[in-house]
Image (spheres, rainbow, N blue to C red):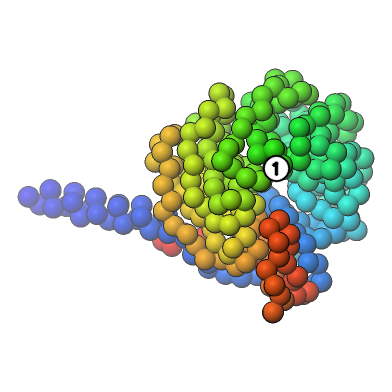
Amino acid sequence: MRIHGFLAVAFCMWCSVAVNAQKYSVTDRIPFGGDQTYWDYLVADAPNHHLYVTRGDEVLILDLNSAKEVARVANLKRVHGIALAKEFNKGFISDGGDNAIVVFDLKSNAVTQTIKVGLAPDAVLYEPTKKRVYAFNAHSHSASVIDARTEKIVATVPLSGIPEFAVTDGKGNVYVNIEDKDSLVRLNADGTKVQDEWSLTPCKGPSGLAMDAKGRRLFSVCDNKLMIVTDADTGKQIAKIPVGVEPDAAIYDGDRKLVFSSNCDGTLTVVKQDSLDKYTVVQTVKTEREARTMALDPVSQKLYLPFEQIKPGTKPPDPGNLPEFTPGTFQLIIVAPQM
């Protein structure tokens, strides 16, 4: 009886920890000065304790532990995303305002090269097996493929529409959402042509994309409050999950089997991967309006979401447009599990 009682108590304690580990809340807010009123994607580099945050014409580089600024890459035009090729000590910034990929040194943070690509590059991705950087050009409906070592363009891949976020499985496969076609593209084994284009219907306006590389599942978040789960090998649609309004980023946490969707309506949707084919919304965390992109530090389990305060009295914008922000109110929300 004692043993059984002890096991029961231990099991209940384990259950409590497991449940609490999935309950997330806003734990801190980090303000930053300046008048920038635009931001996009951000990247956490946990091994080097850095968080890269795009903001207007610059990239802020923060210490992951303290969230204090340690450096910045400035004098850009309109930045969107960052890809890290750490084996070459290089970072690649998509500067949509200059139709360019900006290369910088990861140790000195100095800009070393500017590579002209297509029109309005948005998402940028490093693919480690081929040692290539992919710049996804929104206005020219293409992907510029860059050799990370030589920094030369080796191919331009035509796409059917506006590319949004992209992911790789670390084995050479590259996937990208096509926003205006409500589809998901897989490039061929060489990475220089479209191999497949799969419909995401009933998704409208897919933006953020995440991947469970081991389980071969892709997670596309859509403007019409959906997350679509797709088999990465066959293109078969696995599940449709409700999320918030106009999500712009998705993250998969393989250690905890969770998928996150950051939404423009001031919510963060937390989805539990019960199995490869079954998903359950376990929490909707209140954040802030327009806190629509995010990065995850897998070590601390913290999520970082940038936002800026909307001007009082501002009317809600049309779908797909940004509201008017109050300059000087840019900050990071930190969301973490309650332990």
**Residue sticking out furthest to the top:** 189
**Between 111 and 120, the one nearer to me in the picture:** 120
Residue 115 percent location from the top left of the image: 91, 40
Residue 139 percent location from the top left of the image: 84, 43
**Between 132 and 36, the one nearer to me in the picture:** 36
Q: Which class describes the residues within 10 Å of circle 1: few (<14), some (14-19), or many (20+)?
A: many
Q: Amino acid at mark 1?
A: Glu
SS assignment at label 1: helix
**Residue sticking out furthest to the bottom:** 312
Q: Quadrant of residue 67?
A: bottom right
Residue 334 vs 79, above or below: the answer is below
Q: In the rendered image, is residue 108 in sight?
A: no
Q: Quadrant of residue 323?
A: bottom right
Residue 143 vs 96, above or below: the answer is above
Residue 10 percent location from the top left of the image: 23, 52
Residue at numbered disc 1: 179
- Residue at 18% across / 51% down in the picture? 8
**Residue sticking out furthest to the left:** 1
Q: Is residue 67 left or right of residue 118?
A: left
- Residue at 71% across / 56% down in the picture? 320
Q: In the rendered image, is residue 176 in sight?
A: yes
- Residue at 88% across / 52% down in the picture? 97
Residue 218 percent location from the top left of the image: 56, 36
Tally the marks.
Answer: 1
Q: Quadrant of residue 339?
A: bottom left
- Residue at 81% across / 47% down in the picture? 93
